[in-house]
Amino acid sequence: MQRFVLQYSHPLKSLSFNKGIENMMGKLFAFNKSIFGRLLATFILLSIIPMSVVGLVSFKVSEKLLDAQVSKSNIDTLEQIDKNISVLLDQVSAIVNIYNMNNELESMLTKSYSNIYDQLLDQAKVENSMLRYSFAFDWLNFQSFLIGQNGLIYTQNYQNNIVDPDRLLSYQWDDYLSHMPDRITWLSTHKSFLKNNEGTNVFTASKLLQTANTNKSYGVFVLSVKEDNLYNIYKNLLNNGKEIFILDSNLNIISHSNRERVGGKMEGEPYVQWLSDNDESYKISTINNEKYLTLYKKISRVDWYIVEKIPMSAIYKDIDVLKSRVFLIAFICILLSLAAALFISRTIAMPLGKLSRRIQTYLLKGNTQSIKSPSSVNEINLLTTEYDNMINKLDRTIGDLVKNQEEKRVAELQALQMQINPHFLYNTLNSIKCLVWVQKTHLIEPTINALVNLLEQTINRSDELISIQDEIDNIDHYIYIQQIRTSHTITMNYKIDEQLMPYKLPKLLLQPIIENAIFHGIEPNKTTGTISVYGSQYRGGIKIEIIDNGIGMSEEDIDRIFNETGNQSSSRFSGIGIRNVDERLKLNFGLQYGLTINSQPGMGTSVTLTLPKVQ
C-alpha cells in the first residue's frame, strides 16, 4: 500500500514573505529619495564618469599621437631605405652605361663567323672583359648578359656560369625594349637565367645597344642583380611581426620580408589601391580581422614602392601594459572615491536629516497643511517648502516695512513743505511794509503775488512731481522776494532745452540749491551775484547744472552741507537741505541718479543733478 504525503506552504508564511519584499522595496525607494541616497549616487557618478571619460579620451589621444609618431618615424625609415636602394640602382645604371658606351662591342655583336675557332676566340675576349667588370663591382654580385645581333649570347666566364638560352631569349628583348630604346628598363624579380642558379631570385636591368650615328640596334645588354641585395637593406629592421616589401607599378613583388612571396603578385589586400594616390603616406587597414599600420613610399629612381606593414598590436603593446596598470589604479581610486562619497554624504545628510525630523515633528503637531505625509517628501523638499513659507512671510514683512517707510518719507516731505520758516514770512511781510514807507507801492502787488504763488506751489498743491517749467517759476518767485528783502541784486540765467520743460521732477528740488547758492556763495560777498541754470538731455535722461559765481566752498564745507539733515537758518524758505534733495532723487528714481557738488574757494560752485525723463 503506497502512502502519499501532501506538502503545502502555510498562507501566513507566504503573506509575511510578500510583506517583507514590499518593506524592502519601500526602504530602497525611500533611500533613493533621501538626500543621503541622492548625494551618494551623485558623488559616485561624479567620480566614476569623469574618471572614465578622462581615461578613455587620454588613451584615444595617446593612441592617435602614437600612430602619428610611429608613422613619422617609419616614414623616415622608408626614406632611408629609399636612399640605399637608389644607391644600389645607381650602381646598376652605371654598369649598364659602361656597356652602352663601349663602342668595341658593336663589331663583336654584329660579326658573322665562318669557322668556330674565330667565334670562340672573340667570345672569350668579350666574356673576359665582362668578367673584369664584374670584379670591379664584385660587392654587387650581379649577372650580366650580352645578346648580339648575330644571335650569340655572351656572359661573364666565372664559376662555370651556364646560360639557359631559351629562358633568356623568351623575353623577346628587341620588342620589349624598342618602345624606350634610350632608357634602362627594369624587369621585376624572376628566376635567374643561369642553369646552375635556377632557384635564385633576381631583378633585371636591360638596355638596347645602338650605334652612335644611326641609332641602329646591334644588341641587348641584360644585367641581373640578386634580390638578396634589396633584402639585405631592410632585413635588420624586421621585428615585432613587421613586414617590408617592394612592389612595382603592376603590383609584382620585387622583394619581400616573407621570402616565399618574392617574385609573386600582391593581390586582394586593400592597401594596393592606395599606392597611386601619393608618393608617400600611411593608413590603418584591417586584414584578416587584424588591424595594421601600412606605410608606403615611392622609390625616387624607378616606379617601385616600398611598403611597410606593422601590426597595431605591436604598436600598442606598451600602451596595453600601461592601460592595465591605469585600470588598476582607476579601480583603486574608484574604491577610495566610494568611501569618500559615503563619508561626505553622511556628513551632509545627517544634519539635514535631524533638521528634517524636527520640522516634520513640528508640522505634524501644528501645521499639517504644509505636507501631505512625512514619508511623501525627502529632506530637501521639506526644507524647501518651509523655506518658501519663510520667504513669503519675509516678503510680506519687507513689503509692509517698505510701505511704512514710503509713507513715512512722504509724510516727512509734506512736513518739510509745510515748514515754511515763520521768520522768512515775517521778513517778507516786513519788506512789504517797508515798501509802503519808502513810497514804492508799485512793488507791493508783485511781491505779494510772488509770495502767494510760491506758497500755493509748495503748500496747497498735493502733487509730489511738478514740471520743470513750474519749478523755474517757483525759483523766479523766490528770487524776486529775495531781491525785495535784501539789497543784493541776483541775476538768473536759464539755458534749458525747451523740449525738457514738460518733464516732471520732485517739487522743491531746485529751489533749495538756489537758496544754498545765495546764502553760502553770494551773500558772504555782500555784492551782486549771478546764478546760471543749464538743462540738457544726458544718456537718455536729464542733467541740470546750477552754477554760481560766489565765494566757493572747501571739501569740508561740501561734506558739512551733505551731512545736514535740513536747513536750520531761520532766514531760509523751508527746511529742505542739499542732502534731502539727493536722497529724494535716489528714493524716487534709483541709486544711479542723484546730486554732485564741485567747488573750490574763490572759484564759485557747480551743483549737478541727474534724473530720468518723467512725463
Image (cartoon, rainbow, N blue to C red):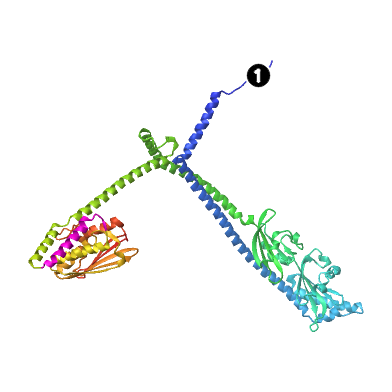
Q: How many marks?
A: 1
Q: Secondary structure at mark 1?
A: loop
- For disc 1, the marked residue is 4
Residue 462 colored in magenta in the image: yes
Q: Nearer the viewer, residue 347 or 258?
A: 347
Q: Which quarter of the rendering shows the C terminus? A: bottom left
Q: Position of residue 65 (x, y in %)?
A: 57, 60
Q: Quadrant of residue 453?
A: bottom left
Can the viewer see residue 233 in this picture? yes
Q: Quadrant of residue 462?
A: bottom left
In the displayed structure image, the side of residue 92 where residue 518 appears, left or right: left
Q: Position of residue 96 (x, y in %)?
A: 76, 75
In the displayed structure image, the side of residue 383 where residue 433 appears, left or right: left
Residue furthest out toward the bottom: 213
Q: Position of residue 266 (x, y in %)?
A: 74, 61
Q: Nearer the viewer, residue 605 or 460?
A: 460
**Rendered position, 18 above or below 276:** above
Can the viewer see residue 336 in this picture? no
User: Looking at the magenta stretch, what is its main secondary structure?
Assistant: helix
Q: Nearer the viewer, residue 180 or 465?
A: 465
In the displayed structure image, the side of residue 488 where residue 194 appears, left or right: right
Q: Position of residue 483 (x, y in %)?
A: 15, 67
Residue 486 colored in magenta in the image: no
Residue furthest out toward the left: 437
| Residue type, mark 1 in image | Phe
Q: Residue at x 31, y 45 (%)?
A: 397
Q: Which residues are magenta?
A: 440-465
Q: Which quarter of the rendering shows the N terminus? A: top right
Residue furthest out toward the top: 1
Are there few (<14), some (14-19), or many (20+) residues within 10 Å of tag 1? few
Q: Nearer the viewer, residue 212 or 288?
A: 288
